[in-house]
Amino acid sequence: MEPVLFYGVPHGCSFGSIVALEWLGQPYRLSRIDMLAKSKSDIYRRVNSMHQTPTLLLEDSTSLRESFAILQNIAARDLDRKLGFAQGTKAYDSLNQMLAYLHTSFHSAFAPAWAAYKLGEGDPAIAILRDLAKEKAAAGYATLQLHLQGRDWLVGETKTIADAYLIGIARWGEDLGLFDLKTDYPGLHRYLQKLEADKAVIFAHAIEDATPAITAGKFLGHVTLDDVGTHLAA
Ligand SMILES: N[C@@H](CCC(=O)N[C@@H](CS)C(=O)NCC(=O)O)C(=O)O
């Protein structure tokens, strides 16, 4: 079977992997995971023991977890697309450096606010957690805005998996009610708006929102977890 990307709703960081698969232009399928569901799927746990998204189920039925690894796997499928670079080159190092920053510093900055989101209303920890996230995320937005000054894309001359990954995470500041990006980070906002106009990004939003989605790549449709279970058992 073609690779299957398990993506999480609402607004998972898996968004970037959907965008990257669209940009790659090779056949793939998607499977939807509700991250807020009370009961966790045993089938999905067989694919990802931590029950996190994203996961890429590969052609040989093995699972690849972690956005960083999934995005590099996607890019390496066709280096001519320039979504990534050949290992051992300076461009590859720059891309890895950016992906590591985006994951370990920027993605993780929001973790306290996501923890607060799951707490019951009136919990005194909420304000502390949100303040902590705001401080860390503000540093991230400022760093990225500065980095983008005089550049069109995060790494190199064309859009890469780093841009795909960032567009799925940068929205969290507004999702969580911590920032107004247009006012607070206008330079970064302009770059994000440019990405929002990309067909693959429009497609990924439609997929998350479960509205009609027009693929700009080779999306072959959704598979259910039951389909995946049958496939895994085979
Ligand atoms: N280190 C993982 C983190 C993935 C992650 O944080 N996924 C979130 C969505 S963005 C998730 O699955 N949350 C649900 C949960 O942890 O139960 C990666 O980079 O792929």
Image: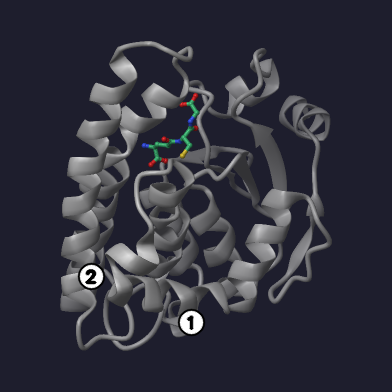
The image shows residue 173 at horizontal and vertical percentages of: 38, 49
In this rendered view, identify the residue nearer to me: 225 or 166: 166
Residue at which label 1 appears: 81
Instruction: Pick the quarter of the image with the C terminus.
Output: top right
Mark 2 burial class by Cα count in 10 Å: few <14, some 14-19, many 20+: some
At 59% from the left and 47% from the top, the residue drawn is 58
Front of the two marks 1 and 2: 2
Q: Amino acid at mark 1?
A: Arg
Vertical side of 229 occupied by 21: above or below:
below
Q: What residue do we see at 38% from left, 11% from top?
A: 123
Residue on which the image places disc 2:
145
Pointer 1 or 2: first along the chain: 1
Q: Which secondary structure lies at badge 1?
A: helix
Residue 10 in which image quadrant: top right
Query: Does residue 72 sit above or below 114 in this rendering?
Result: below
C-alpha gap between disc 1 and disc 2 = 26 Å
In this view of the protein, can residue 162 be seen by the observer? no
Q: Is mark 1 within 8 Å of ligand 1?
A: no
Q: Is 232 on the left-hand or right-hand side of 80?
A: right
* Residue 26, quarter of the rendered image: bottom right
Pointer 1 local density, CA inside 10 Å: few below 14, some 14–19, many at least 20: some
Determine whether, in the image, residue 204 is placed left or right of residue 54: right
* In-front residue for pair 29/61: 29
Residue at 23% over, 23% down: 128
Query: Tag 2, which secondary structure?
Result: helix
Q: Position of residue 94 (x, y in %)?
A: 19, 70
Which amino acid, by three-letter code, is at mark 2?
A: Gln
